[in-house]
Image (cartoon, rainbow, N blue to C red):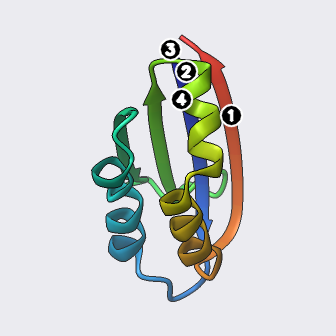
Amino acid sequence: MIRHIYLINLKEGADVQAAIDKMMSLKEHIPYMKAIECGVDFKGDSNSWQVCEMCTFETREDFVKFGSDPYHAEVRKYMANMIAQGAKIDYEI
């Protein structure tokens, strides 16, 4: 299985719940996504990321498909206006 984690800091004034809702909608539109979880940091430390998106895929092939999925592209475009900074990691579990 493949785990994809995306850590995000949103721009000042960005709607956090709208960002979470948009990311969570990926599962409804991408049937080969095994799971998705999103959360908001509650501590607010200076070295913390504000939002985390964690997706799980059964195979590398499914993860590669995700990268070029049209709905994923739509979500990326929507989020691009909200994201100030991001970091990603993809690994096998």
Residue found 53% across the figure and 10% down from its top: 93
For disc 2, the neighbor class at 10 Å (few under 14, some 14 to 19, many from 20) is some
Q: Amino acid at mark 3?
A: Met
Kindly indicate whether the residue at mark 3 contacts the one at mark 2 (C-beta within 8 angstroms): yes
Q: Is residue 19 visible?
A: yes
Q: CA distance from mark 4 to mark 3?
A: 10 Å
For disc 3, the neighbor class at 10 Å (few under 14, some 14 to 19, many from 20) is few
* Helix, strand or loop status at disc 1: strand
Mark 3, residue position = 1
Q: Amino acid at mark 2?
A: Ile
Sooner in the amino-acid sequence: mark 4 or mark 3: 3
Q: CA distance from mark 1 to mark 3?
A: 14 Å
**Up-down relation of residue 58 to residue 70 (above or below):** above
Sooner in the amino-acid sequence: mark 2 or mark 4: 2
Q: Nearer the viewer, mark 1 or mark 3?
A: 3
Q: CA distance from mark 2 to mark 3?
A: 4 Å
User: To which quarter of the image does residue 82 belong?
Assistant: bottom right
Farthest top residue in view: 93
* Helix, strand or loop status at disc 2: strand
Residue found 65% across the figure and 34% down from its top: 64
The numbered dot on residue 62 is 4
Q: Nearer the viewer, mark 1 or mark 4?
A: 4
- Say how many tags the image has: 4
Mark 2, residue position = 2
